[in-house]
Image (cartoon, grey):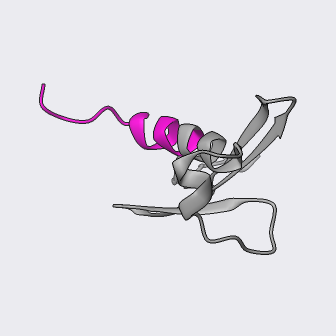
Amino acid sequence: MGQLHQAMPATSAIALAAACASEGTLPAQKMIRGCSDHFLLGHCAGIIAVAASVRDGGIEQVTLFRTARTLMRGDVLIPKR
């Protein structure tokens, strides 16, 4: 208890990207527009890239870009025949 769930930064980034892509919202008004199709959001562990598209007043798609991380490192011993 008292600790943020690990999925919260990604969930928040998706919600913020949807708000940034929606015309008339406060995040859309305050966002610094660039030349790319995705948003860069800073958080305590670094920067995360997300993209969102809006159609007919509704969120059509949100994409969260993640970097690959090492899942396992080790050695495999193959016996000689």
Q: Is residue 3 magenta?
A: yes
In x, y percent, where is residue 66?
63, 52
Left or right position of 80 against 31: right
Residue 22: image location, x then y, percent: 70, 42
The front one of 17 and 65 is 17
Reply above or below: 13 against 47: above
Residue 63 in the image: state x and y as whole percent.
Answer: 73, 42
Tell me if I can see residue 48 in this picture.
no
Q: Residue at 54% across / 45% down in the picture?
A: 16
Q: Is residue 49 above or below residue 56?
A: below
In the visual, does 21 lie left or right of 16? Answer: right
Query: Could you tell me if residue 20 is visible in this image?
Result: yes
* Residue shown at 79% from the left, 34% from the top: 61
Magenta part of the chain: 1-14
Lateral position of residue 42 relative to residue 37, left or right: left
Where residue 40 appears, as percent x and y from the top left, is: 60, 64
Identify the image quadrant of residue 44: bottom left
- Judged from this view, the residue extending furthest toward the left is 2
Q: Image quadrant of residue 35? A: bottom right
